[in-house]
Image (tube, rainbow, N blue to C red):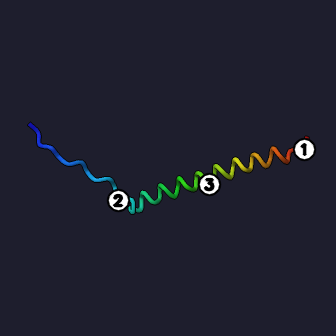
Amino acid sequence: MTSHRAHKPLADPERPVERAVVAGLVLATLAGLAWIVGMIYTVVQWPL
């Protein structure tokens, strides 16, 4: 019979790699929002 082992704790949120991933996600979200706003602006300003 195998012995019971405790699960490994979750990674520390202060680790630099995780901060880089969060920063990348935030930047990607901001870039996506800027693209959407730019598309809306382009459609609104389009000469009819």
Q: According to the image, label 3 marks what residue?
A: 30
Residue at mark 1 to residue at mark 2: CA–CA distance: 53 Å
Say which quadrant the C terminus sits in.
top right
Amino acid type at image mark 1? Pro
The answer to which quarter of the image holds residue 12 is bottom left
At horizontal 69% and vertical 49% (from top left) the residue drawn is: 35
Say which quadrant the N terminus sits in.
top left
Which residue is at the far top? 1
Amino acid type at image mark 2? Asp
Q: According to the image, label 2 marks what residue?
A: 12
At horizontal 72% and vertical 50% (from top left) the residue drawn is: 37
Residue at mark 3 to residue at mark 1: CA–CA distance: 28 Å
Q: Earlier in the sequence, mark 1 or mark 2?
A: 2
Label 3 secondary element? helix
Label 2 secondary element? loop
Residue at mark 3 to residue at mark 2: CA–CA distance: 25 Å
At horizontal 55% and vertical 55% (from top left) the residue drawn is: 26
Q: Position of residue 2 (x, y in %)?
A: 11, 39
Label 2 neighbour load within 10 Å: few <14, some 14-19, many 20+: few
Label 1 secondary element? loop
Query: Quick check: 48 left or right of 43?
Result: right
Q: Earlier in the sequence, mark 3 or mark 2?
A: 2
Query: Quick check: 14 left or right of 45?
Result: left
Q: According to the image, label 1 marks what residue?
A: 47
Callout 3 touching callout 1 (CB < 8 Å)? no
